Amino acid sequence: MSTDADRNVAWAYYHRGLEYSRLGQHGDAIADFTESLRLDPSAWWVYMSRGTAHFDLGDYAQAIEDLTAAIRLDPEAADAYNERGRALSAQGEYERAIDDFALAIRLEPDSPWAYNNRALAYGALGDYEKSMADHNEVVRLRPEEAWAYGSRAITHHERGDYEQAITDLTEAIRLDPTSVEAYNRRGWAHAALGDHQRAIADYTEAIKLGTSNPGAEVNAAQ
């Protein structure tokens, strides 16, 4: 059984691990999360954080193992279901991922992340009607966030609705004029419609933005 001293040290390892994760030092984060769990093996949130770090390193099987441990310790942990669903999607196990996203939504119906991830999983399966329903829910929940429109544009593009993709990407650019990804995707949609001049203009803007800010990232959805 963990003592109060053990739990305090475990807490410090956990929070240092989070800081390593924020810096992209996922190996160091995993080492700290592992030490935290040695001191306090009941901390489901540490399993979840270690699973997410494994995901960020591309070790999806290990991520699923840790996230399953988190869920075993707390079956009401919505974020753990969402994270495990992401790992399952990354392995191409879309049906199982959709089940996890559905559980996350049941537990936290106002969180956009599981809706967005389920929308992408439905899109990967070619079920665009369900995908769009989930994307629309994301936009309802986050109407002022560029990533919500950029993500919905992905499904518009996948089903060949390039004009709707352009509409969503234009809104994404209005909300975040520095979005390299949105310009790239809108250029792609213009090109698919044969509007090569507009495609060139968007790609040119993406190059300009990416060159001035090479670390720029666009899609905040998780």
Image (cartoon, helix red, strand yellow):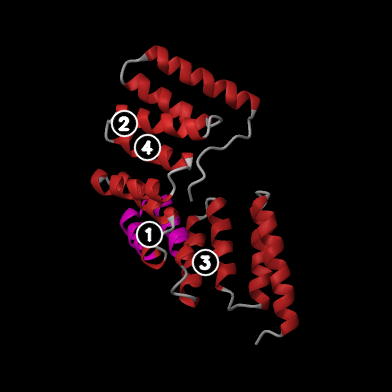
- Residue at (53, 20) in percent of width and height: 205
Q: Amino acid at mark 1?
A: Phe
Is residue 48 shown above or below 6? above
Q: Are marks 4 and 2 in contact (CB under 8 Å)?
A: no
Q: How far is the residue under mark 4 from the one under mark 3? A: 30 Å
Q: Position of residue 115 (x, y in %)?
A: 38, 53
**182 or 124: nearer the eye?**
182
For label 1, the crowd category at 10 Å Cα-Cα, with few meaning under 14, some 14 to 19 and many 20 or more, is: many
Count of labels in the image: 4
Which of the marked residues, 3 or 1, is nearer the chain's N terminus?
3
Span highlighted in magenta in the image:
81-103
For label 2, the crowd category at 10 Å Cα-Cα, with few meaning under 14, some 14 to 19 and many 20 or more, is: some
- Residue at (69, 64) in percent of width and height: 15
Q: Amino acid at mark 2?
A: Gln
Residue under pointer 4:
154
Residue under pointer 2:
164
Q: Are marks 1 and 4 in contact (CB under 8 Å)?
A: no
